[in-house]
Amino acid sequence: MRHRMTRCPTYFCRLLPGERIRIFRENPGYLTDSGKRFLIVDDQYLIRSFLKDLFRYYDLDCEEAVNGKEAIEKWEHEDFNAILMDIEMPEMDGLQATRIIRQKEKEHDRSYTPIFAISGCTLLNPEEYCEKAGMDGFIAKPVVINKLLECVMPLAH
């Protein structure tokens, strides 16, 4: 299968033949200026930078963290619409961080924060591990942009 390349917004993304990026800017229902934020957690600068630029392109505010421990600290001090969390990171992985966040939500009667794994991890059946940890979904790397946007955009209202 041949891939074609498209720009999105400052990075090149691989698309399979016939696959298109849906431009949500044409649908004002997806835009937000409500100050709702997303947390991007990944130990790789390039991934964080790509996701931040993609979110900014769609007028979505985001914060970043480099590991699970930092993600928990940021989550404790701010409310996020959702968290996109890598699984394999130094210091604290995304599965452990998710379990801690879920526990703290219950202990402190805090509102539920959707957490999506976004990972190229080497685990067998990573979706199963993510679900057991309390994550709401799994997005494989390399990221299929439409799948990512389908998870994130409804939470931007």
Image (cartoon, rainbow, N blue to C red):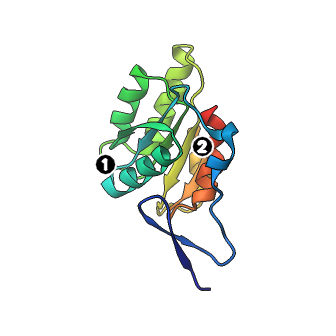
Q: Give the camera-side residue of 25 and 44.
A: 25
In this rendering, would 29 be left or right of 129?
right
Q: Can residue 27 be seen in this view?
A: yes
Spatial separation of the CA atoms under disc 1 and disc 2: 25 Å
Residue for badge 1: 90
Residue 142 picture location, percent across and down: 50, 65
Reply above or below: 137 against 9. above
Q: Give the camera-side residue of 98 and 115.
A: 115
Residue 154 picture location, percent across and down: 67, 39
Contact, CB < 8 Å: mark 1 with mark 2?
no
Query: Which label was assigned to residue 152?
Result: 2
Q: Can residue 131 be seen in this view?
A: no
In this rendering, would 85 be left or right of 114?
left
Residue 55 picture location, percent across and down: 49, 45
- Near mark 1 (Cα within 10 A), the count class, few <14, some 14-19 or many ≥20, is few
Residue for point 57% across, 49% down: 129
Q: Give the camera-side residue of 117 and 62.
A: 62
Inspect the image, locate mark 1, and give the three-letter code of the amino acid beneath it.
Pro
Residue for point 63% across, 35% down: 155
Quadrant of the image containing the N terminus: bottom right
Residue 113, image quadrant: top right
Reply above or below: 8 against 111. below
